[in-house]
Amino acid sequence: MAHAETTTFKAPPFDSARMRASMEAVAIPLGALIVSAFIFSMFLMILGKSPVQFFQLVWRGGFGTSFSFQNTLQRAAPLILTGLAFAIPARIGLVMIGAEGALVVGGFAAAALAIPLVSAQMPVYLTMVLMILIAMLAGGAWNAIAGWLKHTRGVNETISTLLLTYIAIAFMNFFVEGALRDPASQNKPSTMPIGKEYMVENIPGTDVHWGLVFGLVLALALQVLMSRTTFGFAARVTGGNPRAALAQGLPVGGLIVTCSAIAGACAGLAGYFEVAAIHGQANASLVAGYGFTGILVAFLARHNPLMIIPVAIMFGAIEASGGLVQRRMDMPDATALVLQGIIFVVLLASESLYGRFAIFQPKLDRERT
Amino acid sequence: MTADTLTTILIAMLGGAIRVSTPFIFVALGETLTEKSGRINLGLEGNLVLGAMVGYAISFQSGSPWLGVIAAGFSGVFLGLMHGAICSLKKVNDIAVGIAMMSFGTGVAFFFGKPYIQPSAPRLESLPLGGWSSNPALEQALEINPLFIVGILIAVAMWWALANTRIGLVVRMTGDSEPAARAMGINPIKVRILATAAGGFLAGIGGAFLSLSYPGSWNEGLSSGQGLMAVALVIFARWDPLRCIFAALLFGAAGALGPALQSVGISQGYYFFNAAPYILTLFIMVAASGRNSARAAPGELSIAK
């Protein structure tokens, strides 16, 4: 049985090199978080505020009680989806920052489709399925424009996705202020409310809507797609070296457009839940910054779909505790933005640390050199 | 539509173009300088917002809007130095750092800007250059802010300096070929940090224009992507400071389309016309993605590779 022998040689039961690499991928972002917390503490101390009180309040407001933890999970749900919307194109080497726009397009499309369906009193579950489909299709198609322009014309995808975001917001305002405006919405122009019975309910026994479950399932599915399938392998090859991928005959254009579409669909789904579980209608509240926080979530998770879940929960906690911090410490709501900005900058600076620590490198290399 | 209405729309667009284009000119010039050195700074949106806040706050505190303009410039230098220094670390992607600086600059501006949303600060006075005209609309359109003129002077100076001075040569050399620059004894990292800081200064001044002239007050929705549109504008202008002026005027005119139509009573689709500058930018990026533009791009630029 020579064949069996070679396989045991080639695949040792414990893959230490891979283990070390993933330890590095956790340790360096964690270190960056600690450094950011330190810098932010200095910032607070200069302003005469207590960093200890700040982190205590974030803990209490984010995880302290079951109510606050559910609030955290509620806010983590869209962050998981927008995090995925950044991470999937990142795996193929694209920096797409248009999740905010795809979220708006998806949420608006769902709310617009709901108007005729609700007035025709269609069955609730059919309406929900159709709304979810249109939200994902609209968000996916919207973001795919940027992927398509990238592949066919070489248009920089970072700038085009951001422009598409502003165009999406303008389009929504155009309809919400005009043709699709609910006359009853005086101060905040909105579409017609979809009605209580068509709203997404909470997971039984909690105050968290079903969007969280969708986010978890999608994260798992995309993890499998990106790491266990031919599609994911081809995407990673393209991300690593587009020219080699082209030389190998991989359908680079199709991969780029598909990854962009998946990303947009994730963000569009987040838009659906914002409309169908939180606001009940489409209006300017959809532009809440989830798309932009998702970028940071994905970076911290190193574009790993499963790691996005805990990171999204952490940022959900920061947002959930915002009100408490504002009231107790008399700080503006932009405090969370400053903290996010610091984490983002430190995290990117920490990219240069990969490969610097001997402890995380495969042992084989050290013995050879 | 009569000829009269058309004239009104055109004059309103001219006035709008001059007003709206000024921040574009400054941010685009800053970005041109940075990109000429071989680095892209997507974070100028952050410089713009922070510059607007700092300019407004200093003008309010000191009573001198010009002091505000200078302070706004230095807030931009601060962000530019940060961007430049972080990008100089190995394995760090300048586009990602730009996104981070955008969120950092905006966060800091919103944090410290809260107390300045209500009070009104002294604004930059415009120069009435339309006094010769009997048409009041044209007269109003030609009320030009001194910063617009400063911007044009800087553009001409930068165009001349890039082509004719030693500093210009060093910047272009660093941007076109890092090995060649090293061979000449130039430290590319130093050049890029300085170019990003100088570019940040200009973008900060562009921000001060937003809060001190037009729209002329500080609030959190002040800048809506002008900093990023300027990056596209630089590609459209093919990294040429003089072309930046015309590109900025074009963008300004696109932005003024909605308000101009509204001024003659066409309010239908006002919100749709808000999207005009972004759609125009997107079309320009598609059109500019041809070969001509790639040839004009600095060789070390990550988006050109």
Image (tube, coloured by chain):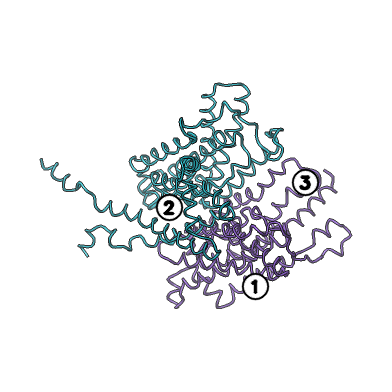
Chain colours: A cyan, B purple
Q: Where is B153 relative to B15, above or below?
A: below
Measuring from the top left, give residue A185's x and y in whole percent.
Answer: 69, 35
Which is nearer the N-term, disc 3 or disc 1?
1
- What's the CA distance linking mark 3 and mark 2? 45 Å
Secondary structure beneath dot 3 equals helix
On the same chain, marks 2 and 1? The answer is: no
Task: State which quarter of the image contains the N terminus of chain A.
Answer: top left
Image side of residue A134 versus residue B260, left or right:
left
Q: Where is A287 relative to B89, above or below?
A: above
Image side of residue B205 versus residue A306, left or right:
right
Measuring from the top left, give residue A149's x and y in whole percent.
Answer: 52, 47
In the foreground, A361 or B26: A361
Could you tell me which residue is drawn at 62 percent across and 59 percent down? Answer: B49
Could you tell me which residue is drawn at 79 percent across and 50 percent down? Answer: B9
Q: Residues within 10 Å of mark 3 (few under 14, many from 20)?
A: some
Can residue B304 be seen from the camera position used here? no
In this figure, which residue is indicated by the disc labeled 2?
A300
- Observer-side mark, 3 or 1, equals 3
Q: Amino acid at mark 1?
A: Ala
In this figure, which residue is indicated by the disc labeled 1?
B157
Task: State which quarter of the image contains the C terminus of chain A.
Answer: bottom left
- What's the CA distance linking mark 2 and mark 1? 43 Å
In this figure, which residue is indicated by the disc labeled 3?
B262
